[in-house]
Amino acid sequence: MKSSRIPTKYSDKITQTVRQLETNGLIVRFEQGNFHSGICVVSGESILMLNKKLDNTQILNLLEHHVKNYIPTSELA
C-alpha cells in the first residue's frame, strides 16, 4: 500500500497515527476542498479523507475518533 503524503504543517503525533492506520489497512488521504473529513468507501476500500484546511487539533480529534476502529487495542501507544 502506498503511504500518504502528510503535509508538513501537521505534528509528529499525526504522522505517527496516520502510519499506524495505514499499517492496519486504512487508506488515509489529505485533500483540500469543501467537504467534511471522514471515512468513505470506494470500490470496497475504506478511505479516511482529511481536509487540509483543518488544523492540528481538528486532525488529531478526527484520527482519535477513527483509530479505535482500525488499530487493535494491543497496538495502541
Image (cartoon, rainbow, N blue to C red):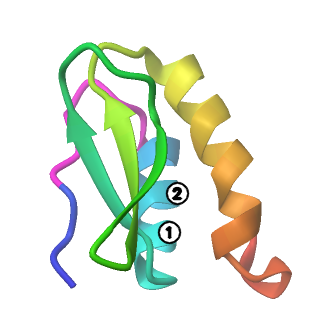
Give the residue drawn at x 26%, y 50%. 29
Residue 68, percent across and down?
Answer: 76, 63
Give the residue drawn at x 43%, y 58%. 18
* Closest to the observer, 15 or 1: 1
Residue 47, percent across and down?
Answer: 38, 60
Residue 77 appears in the figure: no
C-alpha distance separating marks 1 and 2: 6 Å
Q: Are marks 1 and 2 in contact (CB under 8 Å)?
A: yes
Counting labels gives 2
Residue 34, percent across and down?
Answer: 26, 13
* Residue type at the position of mark 1: Leu
Question: What number is the disc on residue 17?
Answer: 2
| Crowd band around label 2 with a 10 angstrom C-alpha radius: few (<14), some (14–19), many (20+) | some
| Left or right of 30 on screen, residue 65 | right
Residue 40, percent across and down?
Answer: 43, 53
* Residue type at the position of mark 2: Thr
| Left or right of 43 on screen, residue 17 | right
User: Which quarter of the rendering shows the N terminus?
Assistant: bottom left
Residue at the front extreme of this rendering: 43
| Crowd band around label 1 with a 10 angstrom C-alpha radius: few (<14), some (14–19), many (20+) | many
Q: Quadrant of residue 9?
A: top left
* Closest to the observer, 64 or 34: 34
Give the residue drawn at x 21%, y 59%. 4
User: Which quarter of the rendering shows the C terminus?
Assistant: bottom right
Q: Which residue is mark 1?
A: 21
Choose mark 1 or mark 2, whichever is in front.
1
Residues shaded magenta: 5-12
